[in-house]
Amino acid sequence: MTLTERLTHYEKLMRLDKPIGILLLLWPTLWAQWLASHGRPDWLILWLFIIGVVLMRSAGCVINDYADRDIDPQVARTRERPLAAGKVSPKEALLLAAGLALLAFLLVLPLGKLVIGLSVVALFLAASYPFTKRFFAIPQAYLGIAFGFGIPMSYAALWGAVPLEAWLLLAANVFWAVAYDTEYAMVDRVDDLEIGIKTSALTFGRYDLAAIAVCYAATLGILAWVGWHRQMNVAFYAGLGVAAVIAFYHLILIRQRDPQQCFRAFLHNTWFGAAVFGGIVLNYVFRSL
């Protein structure tokens, strides 16, 4: 195997060719960066967090494939992943994940003891999430905590503390993650049932659409409460309104539970996160005029 081929396999193992995961992790981090800085982010801290998001999401993907190395070959959508197909060894995967996690850890060293401590928790969440599918009925909720941990870390970096607002934003992200990752899990429902792993799509059963709708509503409700407490202006609520329309569109896409449409809805969630972020940014832009 040439060096170019090996690097290509590493790229696919880290899912750098599929940036949706990076975006779904990045949006809540950006929400927190703008809210914690009152619309005036510290650009150095912001870039450290953006790079950290890419590194930790990549490490998480590698760990996920390592944990699922015996499961992925049995699922049509995942059997060609580098580890499942035998193109990357388990030892290589662990070394790659460790290297990525170390780089991410080095990024937070200048940000203080609280951020460093939270980064250890974030690493534990990312490393342990893949194994929750063996015993947790809704592992997507655990994913939401892991994907949203950039929120309390952002407040810790900018405030030196983690206020209630940060935990509320994290809760909103958990509901959002359950919504979009249930759509994702609906794609593999048949395979997952045969293999015996647990997902929210299987747990919710015939109530999956209702559960997704409730999770989107809870996400928007918590964000609206944060906006009310912050006395955000109409731009923020317009962003939430756009996000609500996007969520309704997703429910239309998945109403027949067609796997391709469910996957399409999952991918489209980046626009939900972007709409919320756009409302936050415009709120501060209009305030400064």
Image (tube, rainbow, N blue to C red):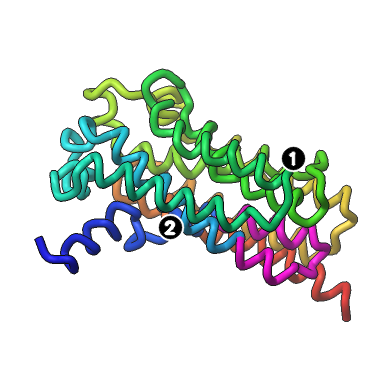
Viewer-proximal residue, 25 or 282?
25
Quarter residue 48 falls in = bottom right
The answer to whether residue 113 of the structure is visible from this angle is yes
> Which residue is disc 1 drawn over?
168
Local packing at callout 2 (Cα closer than 10 Å; few below 14, some 14-19, many 20+) is: some
The answer to whether residue 265 of the structure is visible from this angle is no
Q: CA distance from mark 1 to mark 2?
A: 24 Å
Give, as a single range, the part of the protein colored magenta: 26-48
Q: Amino acid at mark 1?
A: Leu
> Which residue is disc 2 drawn over?
20
Image coordinates for residue 134, horizontal then vertical, percent: 37, 22
* 47 sits left or right of 126 in the view: right
Magenta span has 27?
Answer: yes
Numbered tag placed on residue 248 in the rendering? none
Question: In the rendered structure, which disc, 1 or 2, sits on the residue that comes first in sequence?
Answer: 2
Quarter residue 175 falls in = top right
Local packing at callout 1 (Cα closer than 10 Å; few below 14, some 14-19, many 20+) is: some
Residue at 66 percent across and 45 percent down: it is 116
Magenta span has 131?
Answer: no
Q: Residue furthest left?
A: 1
* 273 sits left or right of 35 in the view: left
Instruction: Name the quarter where the N terminus is drawn.
Output: bottom left
